Amino acid sequence: MPIPEDVTGFEIDADVRQDLKSLPKTLADDVARNLVMVARLLDSEPEDAYKYSRVALRLASRVASVREAAGFASYVTQRYAEALTEFRAARRMTGRVDLWPVMADCERGLGRPEKALAMAGEPEVKQLDKAGQVEMRLVASGARGDMGQFEAAVVTLQSPELGSSTIHPWTARLRYAYAEALIAAGRGEESRDWFAKAAEADTDGSTNASERLAEIDGLEFVDALDPELEGEDDEESQDGPDRSAAPRAKVAVDDTGDNRDIYEDEEDVEEYYDEDDLEIDEDDDRGQQQR
């Protein structure tokens, strides 16, 4: 795939660059430029990011940073079997445990929540930093939900980190997941406060907590630029505005549930696994304008 001329390869993190020093310089530069494209496109154009990751993988499959990048590109495109293979390879090469939660989430993606839940109880979890442990709780709670154990999913997220007033990068996601778990457990009346708390902590838009909060409050945000609304405005102006109608707002609710589409069948999974691996607005007052 073509790479923009402004991409030099030096945009990658220093530790990744160091990882590529085992390769000949020209090859290392080519791999680095592909990894830059993976990082640039992972959120906005994941399929293209995946394609660049496969190029890097063909060029340098023995480099841990390449296997990890390929893993995340596969993960965001829901190629969970491929992702798990790459994460396992990266872990074997480095001995690091920070990929453990995302590996467990791949098991969920493959329809094996029991395996993900088992991983939540492995010794590796104790080696994770605080962010990693919170991530593992999120995965374990999701696995409980996958298995229909909704109250257990709620309990799994109840922790000092959930109740802490200190805001961390993972706080909004944890509170949001807790609110969703309450709804799944039939305790929707308790979820509003937690969506509000999630929205308060969500400074970078990592969740749609504000929209979910507005939905609960019965608001509907209307796009003033929607051309389909112009006809409605003209019709309304003939009879005058309906002052009895409460303000409404339209909420664009993302599908943030835990259900995942599984693309791999059992044969696909077997291709990537071996036995050893398996162990481990208000309305405008238009009446004034008509006068």
Image: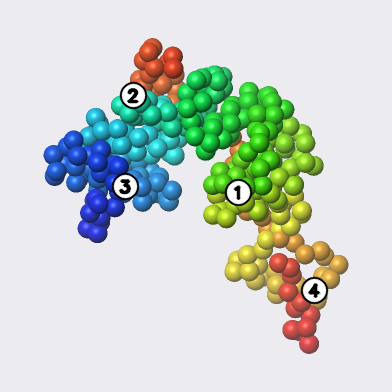
Pointer 3: what residue? 13
The location of residue 259, given as percent across then percent down, is 58, 33
- Numbered label attached to residue 123: none
Outermost bottom residue: 291
Q: Quadrant of the C terminus?
A: bottom right
Which of the two labelled residues, at mark 2 and mark 4, occupies the earlier sequence position? 2
Give the residue type at disc 3: Asp
Pointer 1: what residue? 167
Pointer 4: what residue? 241
Which of the two labelled residues, at mark 3 and mark 1, occupies the earlier sequence position? 3
Nearer mark to the viewer, of 4 and 1:
1
Pointer 2: what residue? 92
Mark 1: which secondary structure? Answer: loop
Who is closer to the viewer here, 113 or 200?
Answer: 200
> What's the CA distance linking mark 4 and mark 3?
58 Å
The location of residue 120, given as percent across then percent down, is 54, 24
Who is closer to the viewer here, 287 or 107?
Answer: 107
Give the residue type at disc 1: Ile
